[in-house]
Amino acid sequence: MPTMWLDSALGFPKFVPMQRTYNWTFLMPFSMGGILGIALYKFCQDVSFSPYNFTDVVKSNAGPFKNNYPGDMDVEDVTVSFVCPVSNVITNFFLSWRNKVVSSYGLYSPSNHYKKTAYILLEDTTRVPISVWRASGLFPKTYPKHMLSYGDENVIKVDVSLSVDKIENYSLVTLLQGLLTSSTPLREAGVLGSFRNLLL
């Protein structure tokens, strides 16, 4: 088969492990209302995200031929799903975050009070991180909506939509180096040791 000699020429191993949909961790290294966001990773069931994409294409014609050029770019919201423990810590966390955005009097806060950074760690089958995505400028657009019913006995699951300014592939080495600096938000959030243990 042609692929066999091509793999040999490129030095590819015979078996290449594939990335699985369940090998990841969503980390929010900040606190809201006294609740450590990094501790909520165990309740996170789904996360959906994408970096910037071109939302349209500018077209022009040169005689009978067409030329396409990239237009404006946009980034989709980060959608996160959580299962809810009895303590209701998920709802309390995001409601406290909402109060950072707008007060009970309807007053909006400066963006540096509520825009946060989170990380999506992609892992191998042994749960060792191999790459990182960084989502910057996060704040919640929607808040946990509870769908209660006597018709079943399912665990409550809530979805949260997070507005984001930038999603970028982030170096795991850079992130580890950042843990050692005094200005890192992980140190300021008081969760440096926990995050370090997860990565090392």
Image: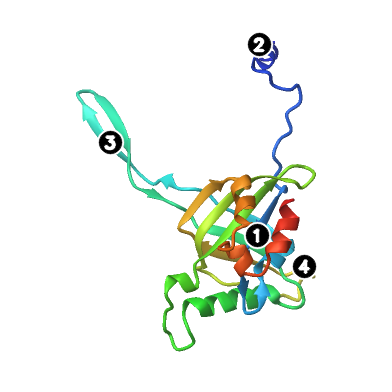
- Report helix, strand or loop for mark 1: strand
Quarter holding the N terminus is top right
Could you tell whether 134 is left or right of 105 in the image? right
Residue 41 visible, this orientation: no
In the rendered image, residue 91, in percent from the top left (x then y), is placed at: 64, 75
For label 4, the residue is: 154
In the rendered image, residue 167, in percent from the top left (x then y), is placed at: 51, 52
For label 2, the residue is: 2
| CA separation in Å, label 3 and label 4 | 50 Å
- Report helix, strand or loop for mark 2: helix
- Report helix, strand or loop for mark 4: loop
Q: Residue sitting at 63 percent across and 75 percent down?
A: 93
In the rendered image, residue 72, in percent from the top left (x then y), is placed at: 34, 47
Please give the label number shown on residue 18.
none
| CA separation in Å, label 3 and label 2 | 39 Å
Q: Amino acid at mark 3?
A: Lys
Q: Earlier in the sequence, mark 2 or mark 1?
A: 2
| CA separation in Å, label 2 and label 4 | 50 Å
Q: Earlier in the sequence, mark 3 or mark 4?
A: 3
For label 1, the residue is: 27
Quadrant in which residue 126 is drawn: top right
Could you tell whether 61 is left or right of 153 in the image? left
